[in-house]
């Protein structure tokens, strides 16, 4: 099943989100747990932020990384130098692996971009052995991403279409408080725990902040890329003014919060 996240290039994704997912990956690993000798599945690997962090965190027997996007798969393969890591294209809602094969399945910033997120979670549960762990994290777009909300809120003041897109952005699957925990429990996982993970997004300038969007990356970039010349000029100026907030251009730091959830496959699964 296609992701709702549009990607034009691996480099563009890195500037928009990859650099931040690298900071978040170790926090998810710490929360989910990991042990030497395990087989671990990375669902929606992107360019490999979680994949390569897993390899550094423990002496794992096998890491399998999958993504729907051929752009991401190609880039993750290009970066990989570890013989224990396999990267392949696959649908999160139809994982091409046998039942109970993995010790853990993790998804870093993925489920909210899967239109049928519950199907993806069901597949993660299917391929994990009894006693194994399923874990995932998604951004809290509504209340935990002020850097991104600054863009969306500014554009929503200018355009009704942006208002509708902002609503979609803020309430994607698994993003409401307790929603992911409820889904984990509904899928039969035990000892389910939900928490929040915090990083900071550090930008050096307005260009560092806005350029990936201006280049058409991500849901907001797709909207911006479709604007005509006059509207685009207005949008660029408005977002710059919001970023600078009356001060000169320069570094800005934004907190970024993600929901995280983990559960254990019951021994009777």
Image (spheres, grey):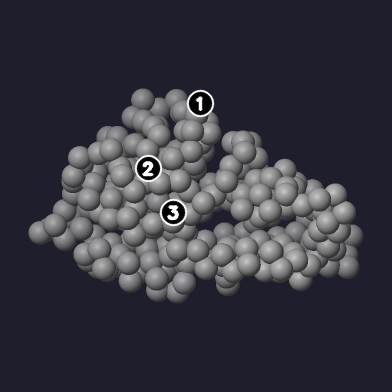
Which residue: 67% across, 68% down? 163
The residue at which mark 1 appears reads as 78
Question: Could you say where residue 46 lies in the image, as x and y percent from the top left?
Answer: 49, 41
Q: Is residue 130 left or right of residue 153?
A: left
Report the Cα–Cα distance between label 3 and label 1: 25 Å
Which residue: 40% across, 74% down? 178
Q: Is residue 5 left or right of residue 82?
A: right
The residue at which mark 2 appears reads as 91
- Residue 8 vertical position relative to residue 83 in the rendered view, above or below: below
Question: Could you say where residue 82 lies in the image, as x and y percent from the top left?
Answer: 40, 27
- Residue 36 vertical position relative to residue 195 in the rendered view, above or below: above
Report the Cα–Cα distance between label 1 and label 2: 20 Å
Mark 2 vs mark 3: which is more N-terminal?
2
Which secondary structure lies at badge 1? helix
Mark 2 touches mark 3? (CB < 8 Å): no
- Give the camera-side residue of 67 and 135: 67
Which secondary structure lies at badge 2? loop
- Give the camera-side residue of 217 and 178: 217
The residue at which mark 3 appears reads as 114
């Amino acid at each position: 099943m296609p992701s709702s996240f549009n990607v034009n290039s691996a480099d563009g994704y890195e500037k928009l989100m990859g650099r931040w997912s690298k900071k978040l990956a170790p926090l998810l690993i710490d929360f989910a747990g990991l042990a030497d000798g395990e087989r671990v599945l990375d669902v929606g690997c992107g360019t490999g932020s979680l994949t390569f962090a897993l390899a550094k965190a423990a002496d794992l027997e096998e890491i399998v990384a999958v993504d729907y996007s051929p752009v991401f798969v190609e880039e993750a393969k290009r970066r990989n130098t570890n013989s224990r890591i396999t990267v392949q294209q696959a649908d999160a809602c139809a994982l091409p692996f046998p039942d109970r094969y993995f010790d853990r399945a993790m998804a870093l910033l993925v489920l909210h971009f899967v239109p049928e997120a519950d199907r993806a979670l069901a597949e993660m549960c299917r391929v994990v052995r009894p006693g194994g762990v399923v874990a995932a994290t998604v951004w809290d777009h509504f209340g935990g991403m002020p850097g991104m909300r600054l863009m969306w809120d500014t554009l929503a003041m200018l355009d009704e279409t942006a208002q509708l897109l902002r609503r979609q952005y803020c309430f994607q699957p698994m993003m409401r408080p307790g929603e992911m925990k409820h889904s984990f429990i509904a899928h039969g996982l035990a000892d389910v725990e939900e928490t929040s993970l915090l990083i900071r997004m550090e930008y050096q300038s307005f260009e560092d902040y806005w350029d990936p969007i201006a280049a058409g990356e991500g849901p907001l970039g797709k909207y911006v890329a479709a604007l005509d010349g006059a509207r685009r000029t207005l949008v660029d100026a408005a977002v710059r003014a919001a970023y600078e907030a009356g001060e000169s251009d320069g570094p800005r730091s934004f907190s970024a919060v993600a929901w995280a959830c983990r559960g254990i496959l019951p021994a009777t699964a």
